[in-house]
């Protein structure tokens, strides 16, 4: 289960609360920290954050779930899975030791049997009404969507459907291959109406296309994860005179065909809990309707299925194929969004397309993405490199993918992914669009070509080399910092974190400098801005990156420019694999990296026109109209966080784009260097309001865009001159460290080291060796006891 993927913001926040220790939670002593086990096929954010992760084939999931059920004591549970019995045994023992305080979650794409087993395990562990509760489902239909689609296709083929209205969907593109609502089948319907934001693949084959409203343009209602109702109000007037689903459905009513959208929503809730105008206005103002959370229900998991044998993976082929929604564009509905296309995949940093993931060992066996002549000329030995690099671009072999008797129409680039189980290929939905729009057309392959209604998420298949290669735009190798062991990334073991963190704590003591230090005493300046990022809370979800792009008018540059290492994001999430085995890494660590706002900034020293300067409040400012594009500052930045406008990326003429941009942030032109400003426009707004009231800026009054968007509260911004501010307390935390501290840049952005809460009884337990190595450098242990970082 990828509990961190999708829209699970609440789950992310709840999970992270039990990962905060020390000053990050306002106390000195280390509280109890939760432990996360993950059993999955493809490496996800959840698996990356897990204290222990088990990579398995999709076909093994049912037997593994049965093995867990048997180990925790579910009556009647048996299993044939024994390959990792020690791993399952120890994990189950840990679950039993925390009855009523544990939780087992099954992934959205898992079979009904796995979900039933998860319910049975939670019931046996006493978790029901403690860590898990049951409510009615949001979808009132008792018919599965796949079954409903099959029935519709059957009726269309029989000529029974005379009028078909499609609201918000794109079935010509994203229905499974065996029940594809293709143009030929759709042509059997006499009258076809499509309602959507764009004229997509489905709209192209309908006689009527009605422009649908964007959700920010309409009145509506929705439910939160617990069922709480929220009233949705429009942010802007409709730009293109669109119609919402409410208005379309109203056309089929016997009367009031042209009823206004606000009245449709309002009248419904007048008879369903909001009896008068006052109650309606309060619900709109508050954002939610009180007492609408779905009540908890008492349910009992059946056990008859436990005696049934597990169904093998269907289809033919030597490999198992796993199908997943893309982590950035999902099922294809966001394919035309340039922000999401250019947003690097959190795990492999790929942009602008989908790939097929294989393990290093499988790639070697299939001779995919192996060393080529260019690598050997550069000094690499044959068979040691899995990616061919030429001029900064990443090359992948193109393959033909077959699944369940079908073949993907486009050739598929292969990507070698550490942590992927052997003999499993993972492909992603959401690409291969032909009518997505100017941004999304013609990108990647269409996995819906082979997906079937009876094998939606996994089955048997094969890949065949085509003898051709293609470039893949991945940012994993861009803006690399110089490797200085623990000065970039730090992680501690939970058992000894406080002791180790205290011994290796970085104090604000720097060697003498030839430059006069800035005076930030309260007599000189009230504010001394700083930021703290807790790596133990960060899950690499990329929310901060998109928020920064939106807030600061950062342009989309396109695949060609990304391949040239010219992406413009002011923030990036660096991903570091940990361990000695590339097939099975010990962990994947995430680190948000942005301008460190150095006290002794190396960029300021080399700018010939004084375009990058230090402010009285400690910000490293950029004066755009001074910059002449020498890029000396970028060359001298050890963190590689400065970006240069090589071309005029921004469209200044299209009116709609003017509405999209933040008017408080300058739009940069060609030839200008730019980077994170700590959202100085928000600082200025808070400062002005404080001066109006004759007071100081309060702690928490300035919230940067990245901080506001972070679902795990990993980012904290504030005034270091305020002794009671959260950021000041976090700066004094034992886990605090500064990246590349030995360079004496004295950054204002500091990090709290990550912590792994491993179970020492697990067979994959491995303590952090770099701590020993660092202590050895300090003479506290023998050099021979240390290990490489």
Image: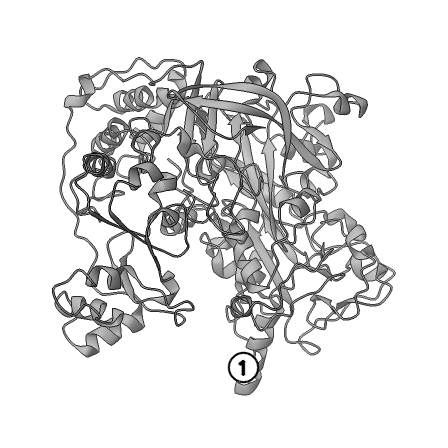
The percent position of residue 591, horizontal first and vertical second, equals 59, 45
Question: Which residue is disc 1 drawn over?
Answer: 689
Classify the position of the C terminus by image quarter: top right
Residue 606: give x, y in percent of width and height. Answer: 85, 59
Give the color scheme: rainbow, by chain, secondary structure or one colour.
one colour
Most foreground residue, 238 or 43: 238
User: Where does the N terminus fall, quadrant-wise?
Assistant: top left
Instruction: For label 1, count other residues whose C-alpha is less than 10 Å away and answer few (under 14), some (14-19) or many (20+).
Output: few
- The quadrant in which residue 359 appears is top right
> What is the secondary structure assignment of the residue under circle 1?
helix
Residue 163: horizontal and vertical position, in percent?
Answer: 21, 49
Residue 592 vs residue 426, the one in the foreground:
426
Report the side of 406 relative to 677 (left or right). left
Look at the image and tell me whether residue 630 can be seen.
yes
Residue 488 is left or right of residue 183, and the answer is right
Residue 453: name its quadrant: top left
Quarter of the image for residue 265 reads: bottom left
Front in this rendered view, residue 642 or 188: 188
* Near-viewer residue (189 or 51): 189
Q: What residue do we see at 59% from left, 33% from top?
A: 577
Q: Residue at x 24, y 32 (%)?
A: 125
Residue 267, position in %: x, y? 17, 70
Q: Is residue 418 placed above or below 710 in the rendered structure?
A: above
Q: Is residue 40 among the parts visible in the rendering?
A: no
């Amino acid at each position: 289960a990828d509990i961190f993927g999708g829209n699970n913001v609440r789950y992310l926040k709840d999970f992270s609360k039990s990962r905060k220790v020390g000053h990050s939670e306002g106390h000195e002593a280390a509280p109890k920290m939760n432990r996360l086990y993950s059993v999955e096929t493809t490496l996800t954010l959840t698996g990356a954050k897990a204290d222990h992760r088990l990579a398995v084939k999709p076909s093994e999931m049912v037997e593994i779930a049965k093995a867990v059920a048997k180990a925790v004591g579910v009556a009647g549970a048996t299993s044939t899975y024994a390959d990792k019995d020690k791993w399952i045994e120890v994990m189950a023992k840990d679950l039993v030791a925390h009855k009523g305080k544990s939780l087992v979650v099954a992934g959205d794409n898992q079979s009904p049997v796995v979900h039933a087993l998860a319910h049975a395990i939670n019931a046996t562990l006493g978790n029901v009404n403690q860590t898990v509760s049951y409510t009615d489902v949001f979808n009132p239909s008792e018919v599965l969507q796949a079954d409903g689609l099959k029935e519709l296709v059957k009726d269309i083929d029989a000529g029974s459907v005379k009028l078909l209205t499609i609201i918000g969907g794109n079935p010509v593109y994203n229905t499974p291959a065996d029940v594809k609502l293709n143009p030929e089948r759709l042509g059997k319907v006499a009258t076809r109406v499509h309602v959507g934001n764009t004229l997509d693949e489905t709209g192209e084959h309908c006689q009527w296309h009605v422009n649908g409203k964007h959700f920010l343009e309409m009145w509506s209602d929705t439910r939160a994860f617990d069922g709480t109702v929220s009233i949705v109000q429009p942010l802007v007037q409709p730009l293109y005179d669109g119609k919402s689903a409410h208005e379309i459905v109203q056309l089929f009513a016997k009367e009031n065909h042209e009823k206004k959208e606000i009245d449709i929503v309002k009248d419904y809730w007048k008879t369903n809990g909001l009896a008068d105008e006052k109650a309606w206005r309060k619900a709109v103002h508050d954002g939610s309707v009180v007492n609408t959370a779905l009540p908890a229900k008492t349910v009992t998991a059946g056990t008859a299925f436990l005696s049934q044998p597990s169904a093998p993976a269907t289809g033919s082929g030597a490999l198992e194929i796993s199908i997943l929604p893309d982590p950035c564009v999902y099922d294809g509905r966001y394919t035309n969004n340039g922000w999401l296309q250019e947003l690097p995949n959190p795990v492999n940093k790929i942009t602008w397309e989908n790939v097929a993931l294989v393990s290093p060992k499988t790639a070697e066996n299939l001779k995919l993405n192996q060393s080529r002549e260019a690598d050997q000329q550069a000094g690499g030995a044959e068979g040691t490199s899995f990616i061919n690099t030429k001029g900064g671009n990443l090359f992948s072999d193109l393959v033909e993918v077959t699944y369940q008797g079908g073949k993907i129409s486009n050739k598929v680039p292969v990507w070698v992914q550490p942590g992927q189980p052997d003999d499993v290929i993972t492909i992603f939905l959401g690409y291969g669009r032909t009518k997505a729009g100017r941004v999304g057309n013609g990108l990647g392959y269409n996995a819906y070509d082979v997906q079937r209604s009876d094998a939606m998420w996994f089955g048997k298949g094969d890949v065949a080399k085509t003898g051709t290669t293609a470039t893949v735009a991945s940012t994993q190798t861009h803006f690399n910092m110089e490797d200085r062991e623990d000065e970039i990334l730090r992680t501690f073991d939970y058992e000894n974190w406080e002791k180790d963190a205290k011994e290796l704590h970085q104090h604000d003591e720097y060697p003498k400098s030839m430059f006069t230090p800035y005076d930030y005493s309260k007599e000189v300046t009230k504010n001394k801005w700083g930021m703290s990022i807790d790596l133990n809370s960060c899950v690499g979800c990329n929310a901060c990156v998109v928020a920064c792009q939106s807030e600061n008018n950062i342009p989309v540059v396109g695949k060609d420019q990304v391949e040239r290492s010219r992406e413009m994001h002011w923030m990036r999430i660096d991903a570091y694999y940990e361990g000695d085995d590339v097939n099975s890494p010990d962990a994947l660590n995430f680190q948000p990296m942005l301008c460190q706002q150095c006290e002794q900034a190396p960029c300021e020293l080399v700018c010939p026109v004084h375009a990058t300067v230090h402010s009285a409040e400690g910000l490293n400012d950029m004066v755009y109209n001074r910059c002449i594009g020498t890029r000396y500052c970028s060359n001298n930045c050890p963190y590689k966080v400065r970006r240069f406008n090589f071309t005029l990326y921004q469209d200044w003429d299209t009116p709609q784009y003017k509405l999209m941009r933040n008017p408080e942030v300058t739009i940069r032109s060609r030839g200008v260097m730019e980077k994170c400003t700590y959202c100085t426009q928000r600082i200025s707004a808070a400062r002005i309001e404080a001066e109006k009231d004759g007071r100081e800026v309060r702690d928490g009054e300035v919230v940067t865009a990245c901080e506001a968007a972070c679902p795990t509260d990993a980012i904290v911004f504030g005034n270091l001159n305020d002794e009671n501010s959260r950021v000041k307390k976090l700066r004094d935390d034992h886990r605090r460290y500064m990246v590349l501290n030995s360079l004496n840049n004295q950054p204002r952005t500091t990090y709290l080291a990550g912590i792994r809460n491993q179970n020492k009884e697990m067979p994959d337990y491995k303590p952090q060796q770099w701590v020993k190595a660092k202590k050895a450098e300090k003479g506290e242990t023998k050099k021979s006891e240390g290990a490489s970082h």
